[in-house]
Amino acid sequence: MTYPQNFEEKIGFDKIRGLICDRCLSTLGSERVAGMQFQTSFDTIDR
């Protein structure tokens, strides 16, 4: 299934990412969170 470019914003995932980033204690943690993407692949999620 193809999702629109702004899907993460529509479902609020960008806000969740921001809340997690605010709790990071280091820049490395913030960078990792910023690189997170919403996953739609069951195989990726199931790992």
Image: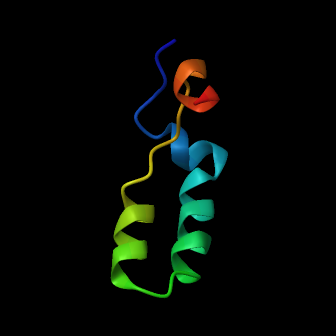
Quarter assignment of residue 16:
bottom right
Q: Is residue 12 left or right of residue 4?
A: right
Number of labels in the image equals 0
Residue 27 in the image: above or below residue 20: below
What is the x, y in percent for residue 44? Answer: 52, 27
Quarter assignment of residue 45:
top right
Task: Out of 35 and 10, give the one closest to the viewer.
Answer: 35
Colouring rule applied to residues: rainbow
Q: What residue sits 42% from the left and 74% below the top?
A: 29
Q: What residue sits 41% from the left and 74% below the top?
A: 30
Residue 2 in the image: above or below residue 25: above
Q: What residue sits 59% from the left and 52% below the top?
A: 13
**Which residue occupies the extreme bottom position in the image?**
25
Position of the C terminus by quadrant: top right
What is the x, y in percent for residue 4? Answer: 45, 28
Task: Out of 18 and 25, give the one closest to the viewer.
Answer: 25
Residue 42 in the image: above or below residue 25: above
Q: What residue sits 34% from the left and 76% below the top?
A: 28
Task: Out of 31 and 17, give the one closest to the viewer.
Answer: 31
What is the x, y in percent for residue 26? Answer: 41, 86
Quarter assignment of residue 31:
bottom left
Residue 23 in the image: above or below residue 33: below
**Which residue occupies the extreme top position in the image?**
1
Q: Is residue 8 left or right of residue 36?
A: right
